Amino acid sequence: MFYHEHYWSNPKGYEWLKRQFGEEYNIHNLTFRNNHIPTQVDAIINIPRPGVLIKNPHMDMNKECTKLFKENEWEIFDVPAPTTFMLPQHCNATPWLHINMLSINEDTIIAEASEIELIKFLENEIGLNVIPINFRDFISFGGSF
């Protein structure tokens, strides 16, 4: 289980998870360099299939988590930048919300249809089948898949 300590969460939440679930699950505290604005973890990293982590190239994980993934032989990829950094007026989301995708199974993922470079990356580098869906308008509400 991964816990993202940042604006909406704090060390006490991490401690509570460890107390409640630490005997059943391994719980890891993720922190990121260059994470200066409120950003949900699903706009920083995504795990599209077991053993594969994709991430925002501008926010590196703490050394302990990077070590954890590498020791367990995970492949770590930087995703391409979003198609546009323009957001709707009054939108508080990050353009990197394109990383928030929905895995259907280990081979299939739903991604924003306008993110052509991301889709090519997922198909060619990761080997996923991508179902492109027009969902960009929902960024106005701070969410994605």
Image (cartoon, grey):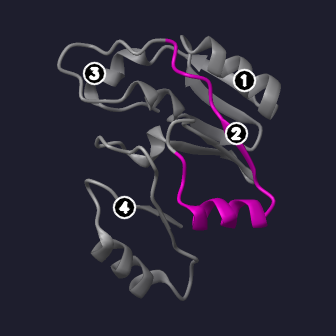
Under mark 4, the amino acid is Glu
Mark 1 against mark 2, which lies toward the viewer?
Answer: 2
Q: CA distance from mark 1 to mark 2?
A: 10 Å
The disc at residue 121 is 1
Q: CA distance from mark 3 to mark 1?
A: 25 Å
Numbered range of the magenta stretch: 60-83
Q: CA distance from mark 4 to mark 1?
A: 29 Å
Label 4 sits on residue: 5
From the image, which quarter does the N terminus lie in?
bottom right
Label 3 sits on residue: 140
Callout 3 secondary element: helix
Q: Earlier in the sequence, mark 1 or mark 2?
A: 2
Taking 70 as reference, is 138 left or right?
Answer: left
The answer to if 78 sits in the magenta stretch is yes
Mark 3: few, some, or many residues within 10 Å (few <14, many ≥20)?
some
- What is the x, y in percent for residue 126? 78, 34
Mark 2: few, some, or many residues within 10 Å (few <14, many ≥20)?
some
